[in-house]
Amino acid sequence: MSQVIEFAGINEQVENDDEFNSLLDISIHHKIPHLHECGGHGACTTCRVRILDGIYNCSPKTEIEKSTGFARKWDPSIRLACQTYPKGNVKLQRLIWSSAEVNQLQKELAPEGKAEERPIAIVFCDLRNFTGLSSENLNFDIAFMLNRFYTALGEPILMNNGIIYQYVGDEIVGVFGTTGGSKEKNCMDAIRAALGMQYALDLLNKTELKDFQVELKSGIGINFGNAYVGHLGHPTHRQFSVIGDPVNVASRIQGYTKVTGSKILISKSVFRCATKDALMVGNIYSADLAGKEEEIDLYDLVGFKDMDLQLELQASLHIILQDDITFAKLFYDTVFELAPIARSLFRSNMTDQGRLLTHMLGGIVYSLSRPEHLNSGLKKLGQSHVKYGVKAEHYPIVKQALMSAINQTLGDLKTERAMEAWSTALDFVMDAMQNWKSL
Ligand code: HEM
Ligand code: FES
């Protein structure tokens, strides 16, 4: 018997008459963007939904759902869409709308009412000359600039599996590794985020702020060490907290960039934990930081020695997805020009299809920093493509069309490195999709 599934928020109702369709399958079938990083294996929690009506029409929780819900302290109305099969009408709300929100979910895994020690990298980024800017510009313009600063520089934190921890005045603080992870990964994520912030600030100055006659500048300090993570505070108002000496030192390292005139300074502990030989560093300073008995070594971070795939993709993603409808149109026009026969594989409405494609491309770039889910997600996508009638010979055509759309969209902002990064990433994605049999 057919069921009605209602999506709150977008006011869409769809019908389902296949009992083997999970709530996630239903979204995908009806081209409703629904994050599912792990491809529906119950491992990532990004497909979570709140059941607003019809909870009794949902299949019982699977073991994986029970343990996930318990660890994250979910109330019973929250379900994993990939694990839930409707038996009657259901009204639901998707809870995670964008890949950028996914990292914040790490906070759910921090202990309640106490703190645990975890190896963390901390990034402090300060907007330079903010006081001068405030006196020279209208409040309205300052608010606009600050908002753009926070958004543009927050994104690289989120793209690299970090949490935007705090805004302190004109500072933005990111933390990496709050749920554990290796020292190397946490430090590399933080470093990539810091370099991404510089790219983002450059782009912001060249584009959205170009008419303000100001050039925003930043100073960034990064430290690594064991800090305490937990939800602390009054029992009715607990707050996600990261505390400890490494956090204070990161703030002081940021302050020290004003002494040295550096853009990014990293501590010796970050330098030591980072991937061997990956970093290009400049001057090394022996700094006497407040509260520290001994001087500590700080390194000017210049960049990566070699092209960094993730950083290049992240830096260009924003430009590519700025006008996702135009991008999708450019792409599909080229696909159908190169292979007119492919048109028949698609079930009409190319705008929705384009929205899904760009949603997915953005999701892939974000989830490169969470590779544990990415591979299974791509294989599942590849398996679905076999059912859509997609053949091996279609992949090079789609790659060519995507590269052409990326090339045209980046325009003057195109760099050889960005194009190389996209080409490598698409090969990786398409290989994983075609390797679905190893799921
Ligand atoms: C980078 C590689 C690709 C990505 C990221 C991608 C992404 C997607 C996504 C997200 C969907 C929505 C449905 C779902 O999630 O299962 C989709 C559907 C689809 N894709 Fe792809 N795709 C890729 C390659 C291809 C290729 C090579 C073809 C061949 C022409 C193709 C044809 C289709 C078709 C026919 C559908 C179903 C459309 C419909 O239901 O009307 N895709 N793709
Ligand atoms: S948990 Fe449902 S898609 Fe990952």
Image (spheres, rainbow, N blue to C red):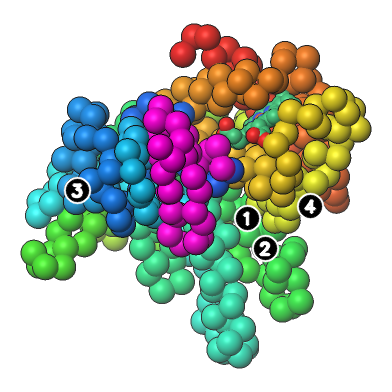
Q: Is mark 1 in CB contact (under 8 Å) with mark 2?
A: yes
Say above or below: 402 vs 247: above
Q: Earlier in the sequence, mark 3 or mark 1?
A: 3
Give the amino acid at mark 1. Ala
Q: Residue at x 63, y 59 (%)?
A: 201
Mark pair 2, 3: CA separation: 43 Å
Q: Of 252 and 423, which appears nearest the observer?
A: 423
Front-lying residue, 389 or 38? 389
Residue that badge 2 annotates: 204
**Kind of residue indicated by mark 2:** Leu
Q: CA distance from mark 1 to mark 2?
A: 6 Å
- Do the residues bearing badges 3 and 1 touch, measured as CB atoms within 8 Å? no
The residue to which callout 4 is attached is 326
Residue 65 as seen in the image, left or right of residue 273: left
Q: Which residue is mark 3?
A: 76
> How many residues crowd around disc 1 within 10 Å: few (fewer than 14), some, or many (20 or more)?
many
Give the percent coordinates (x, y) of residue 215: 68, 70
Mark 1: secondary structure:
helix
Q: Earlier in the sequence, mark 4 or mark 3?
A: 3
- How many numbered markers are drawn? 4
Q: Which residue is mark 1?
A: 200
User: Which of marks 4 and 1 precedes in the sequence?
Assistant: 1
Q: Is residue 12 magenta?
A: yes
The answer to whether the residues at label 4 and label 3 have Cβ atoms under 8 Å apart is no
Range of magenta residues: 1-30
- Count residues near mark 2 (Cα–Cα under 10 Å), then give few for <14, some for 14-19, many for 20+: some
Instruction: Tell which tag, 2 or 3, sits nearer the viewer.
Output: 3
